[in-house]
Amino acid sequence: MRVTEGTVAVEVPEQADAGVGEDVFFNPVQELNRDLTVAVLRALEAERDGDGDRTPSYLDANAASGIRGVRAAAEGYDATLCDVDPDAVELCRENLARNDLDGRVVHRDANALMHEETFDVVDVDPFGTPIPFADAAFRGASRLVCITATDTAPLCGAHFESGVRHYSAVPRNTEYHAEMGLRVLISALVRTAARYDLAAEPVFSHATKHYARTYLRLDSGAQAADALVGDLGHVDHCEHCLFREATRGLIADPLDWCPECDEAIQTAGPIWLGRTCDPAFAEAVRDAVDDGMGTAAEARDLCETVAAELDEPTHYDQHRLCKRWGVGAVAMDKFIERLRDAGFSASRTHYGGTTFKTDADVTEIRAAALDEE
């Protein structure tokens, strides 16, 4: 079937369910992901200074239908599309030709290619965990690594053992599970890059529709890598009263009991405790979204929310709190306003319509924002 995204049209196998079957993989639900990728590539290109004569290079490491690589080529990138599946390789060639675009299609194992060649941007969008491609991606990229993870159950701790194996971290299945998953992913990637004396700083990240996506800007040098490792740490979490406390450091020093209610504590980590985006870059991505994108309104809203999120490593859900405490919910704008009027910082988050971040603890949240007027 023919699919149009942005300025390109590609042929993809017809599938009764998104991404299901033996044909070349294509997931229409990822259109937002791909629209934002194009906007990120535009924002990245706008940053270039003094290097305007050289065409930037882009690797679609898990090309499948080639739609990512085709869209990158349409943006003026020197695109390479790589896949181990010969049917996918042929489809990539056809889709480039269908749009009259130049691009290289490679029938290779992506890890081998990334160890042999260097690209300005490496995009890894595999089925499941991206960790088997992470080392090669950081060896093969010079400016930006883009990573998608669709194994959200291991990332957020719902499949605990798998999460520990894949990400060398202890994930916990909390009410902020989407953020837990994103921060476990970034932690693993920051640690992987640091092995090569690379600082991989997340400049734009989101957890949307059963996947996590992050874009990491690269900087060389042991000191830069050490600085980012310093933003790794652990979160102590009480499931009984929702107390949580974040502590930086690779060595966990967990609390034995909750200081608020004396119940048992769960500890997650090492997770990423720093910012998951650069607000200025997120705003540049928002400005790069155009009306021709199928998810333009959603993409702009997400960028604005991500840019405005507080620098807090966990979030709350107002509706869950209200249900727990047996009180009525209020409109989110009023809720945030009450927290701010009480002297706390507060922001909405992109993880859901009723999720928020604040520097208030649970008791302060209830006193400031949830009690009846």
Image (cartoon, helix red, strand yellow):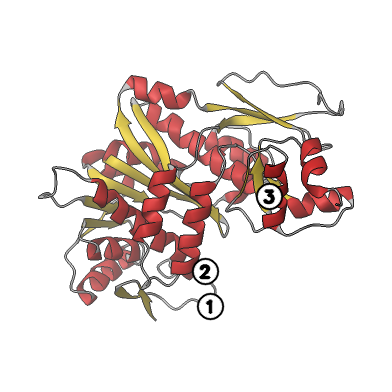
Q: Which mark is residue 248?
A: none
Q: Amino acid at mark 1?
A: Ala
Q: In this orientation, which residue lies closer to the viewer: 120 or 105?
A: 120
**Residue 258 in the figure: left or right of residue 235:** right
Residue at image coords 59%, 18%: 251
Name the image quarter holding residue 364.
Answer: top right
**Residue 53 in the figure: left or right of residue 262:** left
Instruction: Nearest to the eye among marks 1 and 3: give it.
Output: 3
Q: Which mark is residue 16?
A: 1
**Residue 373 in the figure: left or right of residue 299:** right
Residue at image coords 61%, 30%: 269
Q: Residue furthest bottom?
A: 1
Q: How far across and how far down the image is residue 226, in percent?
A: 41, 21
Q: How far across and how far down the image is residue 249, in percent?
A: 56, 20
Disc 1 + disc 2, Cβ < 8 Å: yes
Q: Which residue is mark 3?
A: 337
Q: Residue furthest left?
A: 53
Callout 1: helix, strand or loop? Answer: loop
Q: Amino acid at mark 2?
A: Val
**Residue 210 in the figure: left or right of residue 358:** left
Residue 155 visible in the shown view: no
Relative to 234, residue 55 above or below: below
Residue at image coords 57%, 60%: 209
**Quadrant of image for the N terminus:** bottom left
Instruction: Nearest to the eye among marks 2 and 3: give it.
Output: 3
Q: How far across and how far down the image is residue 313, in percent?
A: 60, 37
Count neighbours of disc 3 (C-alpha within 10 A) and say few if under 14, some if 14 to 19, many if 20 or more: some
Disc 2 + disc 3, Cβ < 8 Å: no
Q: Which residue is mark 2?
A: 20
- Rounded to the nearest whole Å, what is the CA distance between mark 1 and mark 2? 7 Å
